[in-house]
């Protein structure tokens, strides 16, 4: 079993319902959800001319290999209406593998740890909530330290909603 950290989010449709269904599908198809962060709302990152996102971080326990996990997660995205039309575009759901244990993976289709996580406050704030002491296997810094060093000024607001 591997502990895997994921970032999930979306900005189209019923955002809360999409997160809830996404978590249910991950639990059924990819691995058991062990930890989940609060829900956070942010402006879009990278392509700002779109609706605000809701984001969360999850830790799952899985037996899937990294490639098999990626395929399962992409299948869940597709089943929830994800269309890949524009880079950093609006979407019903997005699921990113942030960490796969302490593995470093670089293939044509998957890079883990996620190469931009240290630059994205909307990823780091929920991730810090569930695993502040986890050490990034390349940067050799804890999530908490990476969060404190992040230069992203995009506001990340914790919602009072729960799933």
Image (cartoon, grey):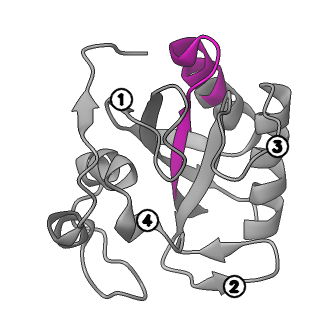
Residue 148's tag is: none
Q: How much space separates mark 3 and mark 1, taking CA atoms?
A: 23 Å
- Work out whether mark 3 precedes mark 1 in sequence or the reverse, and give the earlier one: 1
**Disc 2 marks which residue?**
106
Dots 2, 1 in contact, CB < 8 A: no
* Front one among 2 and 56: 56
Q: How much space separates mark 2 and mark 1, taking CA atoms?
A: 30 Å
Q: How much space separates mark 2 and mark 3, taking CA atoms?
A: 24 Å
Residue depth check, mark 2 versus mark 3: number of the one nearer the observer = 3
Is 61 placed above or below 103 here? above
Residue depth check, mark 2 versus mark 4: number of the one nearer the observer = 4
**Disc 3 marks which residue?**
85
Work out which quarter of the rendered image holds the C terminus and state it: top left
Is 8 placed above or below 150 here? above
Residue stretch in magenta:
5-22
Dots 4, 3 in contact, CB < 8 A: no
Rendered residue at 27%/20% (across/down): 159
Is residue 14 left or right of 54 when viewed as pictured?
right
Kind of element beneath mark 3: loop
Please check the rendered image and state whether residue 160 is part of the magenta-colored stretch, yes or no.
no
Q: How much space separates mark 1 and mark 4, taking CA atoms?
A: 17 Å
Kind of element beneath mark 2: strand
Rendered residue at 54%/59% (across/down): 4
- Res 97 quadrant in image: bottom right
How packed is label 2: few (under 14 Cα within 10 Å), some, or many (20 or more)?
Answer: few
**Disc 4 marks which residue?**
117
Q: Position of residue 71 (x, y in %)?
A: 84, 54
Rendered residue at 83%/36% (across/down): 83
* Front one among 63 and 158: 158
């Amino acid at each position: 079993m591997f502990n895997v950290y994921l970032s999930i989010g979306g900005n189209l449709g019923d955002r809360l319902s999409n997160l809830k269904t996404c978590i249910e599908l991950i639990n059924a198809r990819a691995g058991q959800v062990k930890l989940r962060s609060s829900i956070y709302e942010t402006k879009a990152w990278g392509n700002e001319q779109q609706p605000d996102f809701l984001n969360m971080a999850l830790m799952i326990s899985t037996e899937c290999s990294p490639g098999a996990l990626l395929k399962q997660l992409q299948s869940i995205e597709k089943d929830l209406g994800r269309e890949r039309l524009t880079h950093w575009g609006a979407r019903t759901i997005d699921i990113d593998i942030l960490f796969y244990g302490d593995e470093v993976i670089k293939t044509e289709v998957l890079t883990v740890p996620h190469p931009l996580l240290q630059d994205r406050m909307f990823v780091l704030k929920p991730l810090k909530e569930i695993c502040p002491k986890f050490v990034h296997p390349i940067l050799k810094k804890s999530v908490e330290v990476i969060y404190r060093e992040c230069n992203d000024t995009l506001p990340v607001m914790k919602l009072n909603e729960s799933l």
